[in-house]
Image (cartoon, rainbow, N blue to C red):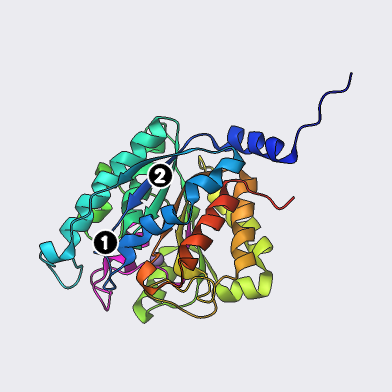
Amino acid sequence: MTKPKRHWGEIQARRVRERVGRLRFFGVPMDLGQDRRGVDMGPSAVRAAGLATKLQPLGLEIQDEGDVLVPSPEAREMGSHKAKFLAEIAEVCEELSLRVEASLDAGERPIVVGGDHSIAIGTVAGVSAHFKKRGQSIGLLWVDAHADMNTPDSSPSGNVHGMPLACCLGIGPEELTTIGGFEPKVDRDHVVLLGIRNLDDVERELVKKSGVHAFTMRDLDVRGMADVMEEALSLLCDGTAGFHVSFDVDGLDPSIAPGVGTPVRGGLTFREAHLLMEMISDSNKALSFEMTEINPILDQRNATAEVAVDLLLSGLGKRIL
Ligand SMILES: [Mn+2]
């Protein structure tokens, strides 16, 4: 007797479910890290784009426990112009960090959706804290048009969303670098910046001095995504428990992700971005994902949230064949 042939979809769903496990969604409607209103609607836009429904054919379920509370800028004082809303951002990141850590402790895989990129300070703190307890370190893949390595002294705007990668490396205001009671959250040897194409003068020097691995758009032009990602993955995984993916949607080309506060031409194409995510999935080493800077007010018919959802699916195991 021959066994009944299983449907392709069923086989894929089982493969993905076994590898990925349980997911938990954290919405972080943070807009205190930059000046454009609307980025606080990012989590809703991603829910509206159907993340939970679209995960089902992959055999994945995502628990959504609502959004982390973020105070409105109108209700608070901005504080220092060198790092606006520093106290509020630190408070939100502290809370997010605890929730992300608890989720990993419970054997789940956190999916964090912003909100501006300052939330990464909390997410990375939480992921790092979980593995630190087990004597392990993590890698960090930062996909972005910008390097996000400013400090209050170097930043022309004082917007904290331009500082989170520096904070993860232990460079920046103590309120942000010491979340969880330890720093740095990641070692520069295991940090990869990918897709950058627009840096401030001082920041350019900071990136070079920091020792992180930076792959610019030019590198991607010359070498291609597959080659760059192969090297990136070996840097991210070498001696670590795996890596966190912090994806700023402004890393994408504005033609496919128009809903961002700081669009820069010449970003990742639709296919380059998918290949990146597919290779992440193939590596089976992504510990957690984060999509940031989706701004529905600036978007066209939710296209940016939809591409973010598509990319998450690829990162979690959706395949063409
Ligand atoms: Mn960013």
Task: Establish if 151 lies above or below 290.
Answer: below
Ligand 1: which quarter? bottom left
* Location of residue 19 (image quadrant): top right
Q: Which residue is mark 1?
A: 172
Where are the magenta residues, as a range? Answer: 141-169
Check contact, mark 2 vs mark 1: CB within 8 A. Answer: no
Magenta: main secondary structure equals loop
Residue in the foreground of this view, choosing between 124 and 237: 124
Could you tell me residue 216's position as x and y percent? 54, 72
Q: CA distance from mark 2 to mark 1?
A: 28 Å
- Residue drawn at x 30%, y 61% as measured from the top left: 40
Residue in the foreground of this view, choosing between 136 and 314: 314
Give the SS element for disc 2.
strand
* Location of residue 155 (image quadrant): bottom left
- Residue drawn at x 42%, y 69% as measured from the top left: 147
Does the magenta-highlighted stretch encompass residue 261? no
Does the magenta-highlighted stretch encompass residue 151? yes
Q: Nearer the viewer, mark 2 or mark 1?
A: 2
Give the SS element for disc 1.
loop
- Residue drawn at x 39%, y 43% as measured from the top left: 127
- 279 left or right of 190? right
Residue in the foreground of this view, choosing between 140 and 320: 320
**What type is the residue that disc 1 sits on?**
Gly
- Residue drawn at x 19%, y 72% as measured from the top left: 82
Q: Which residue is mark 2?
A: 25
